[in-house]
Amino acid sequence: MAAQTILHVTDLCKTYITNKKPTNALRNVSFNVDKGEMVAIMGPSGSGKSTLLYTASGMDTATSGEVMLDGENIATLPKKRLANVRLEKMGFIFQQMHMLKNLTILDNIILPATEAKSKKRSRKEIAEQGQMLMKKMGISEIAGKDINEVSGGQLQRACICRCMINDPQIIFADEPTGALNRSSSDEVMEMLCGLNREGTTIMMVTHDSRIAAKCTRVMFIVDGEIKGEKHLGEFTDGSNIRDRERTLNNWLMEMGW
Ligand SMILES: Nc1ncnc2c1ncn2[C@@H]1O[C@H](COP(=O)(O)OP(=O)(O)OP(=O)(O)O)[C@@H](O)[C@H]1O
Ligand SMILES: [Mg+2]
């Protein structure tokens, strides 16, 4: 059966203007993401990775181009509709985690569900799902804590729970392990790979080839253009991570990494 494309990006451009000087952060970028893929975006600092993630997810507006998600061009949707699409169909994980200080971890996690319009559920059902996700991510014990009472790794796992609360079709993550030590990074990556194996599509920026080696495909971006992509196949229990890392690193070297 042919894979189902869930994100279809065509000729995406983003030009920032600062002090009247333009920066072409994205130059006619086109790509597809299929359902169930876990795509890593790699490239040098300033190459446009975050810009790509933000414009492809409707967090920021593109200068031109098309971003089709579920049959809708989110690049041109009116603000309100876009806010709903983002809330109900997408999950977001960022390094600066945007968690609210005056709410508990659990309340932060369920906030997007209480705000979603069409997926109306009772507060009790939502809280139960929040608790279930926390259990799955191994952080049940921090449900009632404040965000400054937990570790960086726990907080990042809480962010994963929050991004899953509305059962998104696709998760966008910008350096989800960037601020974490090695063991917390591995834990967070294990959680993301688990969600991906269960069917959630993921698109993430990372500069770490150890992390990218667990993805199904890696796109390499330089100066606002996709220079190449490498298919690594699904990362399963039987996969040899060292082989994958070697394959990826060799390819990255060819790409000029
Ligand atoms: N808000 C902004 N205003 C003006 N220029 C910007 C803005 N955000 C990014 N840029 C510029 O756009 C280009 C791409 O930036 P972007 O943040 O997407 O890079 P990146 O690949 O994510 O880099 P890093 O690995 O350092 O996070 C850079 O030249 C950057 O200086
Ligand atoms: Mg960035």
Image: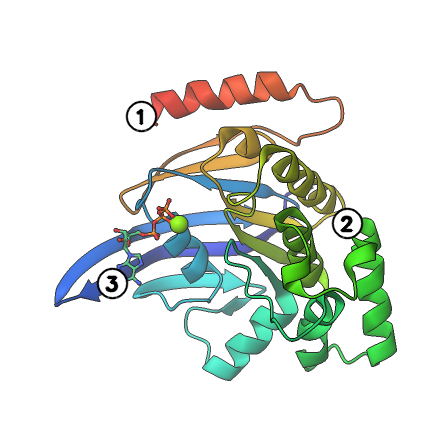
Q: Tag 3: residue type? A: Tyr
Indicate which disc, 1 or 2, sits on the residue closer to the N terminus: 2
Q: What element carries label 1?
A: loop
Q: What element carries label 2?
A: loop
What is the CA distance from the residue labelled 1 to the residue labelled 3? Answer: 26 Å
To which residue does mark 3 refer? Answer: 16
Q: Is mark 3 on a helix, strand or loop?
A: strand
Q: Looking at the image, can residue 241 be seen?
A: yes
Indicate which disc, 2 or 3, sits on the residue closer to the N terminus: 3
Asked whether 78 or 176 is in front, the reply is 176
Of all residues, the one furthest to the front in this rendering is 149
Q: Where is residue 194 in the image (x, y as percent from the top left)?
A: 74, 42
Compared with 113, 220 (above or below) is above
To which residue does mark 2 refer? Answer: 137
Q: Would you say the residues marked 1 and 2 are in contact, meaning their CB atoms lie under 8 Å apart? A: no
User: Is ligand 1 closer than 8 angstroms to the Cβ of mark 1?
Assistant: no
What is the CA distance from the residue labelled 1 to the residue labelled 2? Answer: 37 Å
Q: Tag 1: residue type? A: Gly
What is the CA distance from the residue labelled 2 to the residue labelled 3? Answer: 38 Å
Q: Residue 256 carries which label?
A: 1
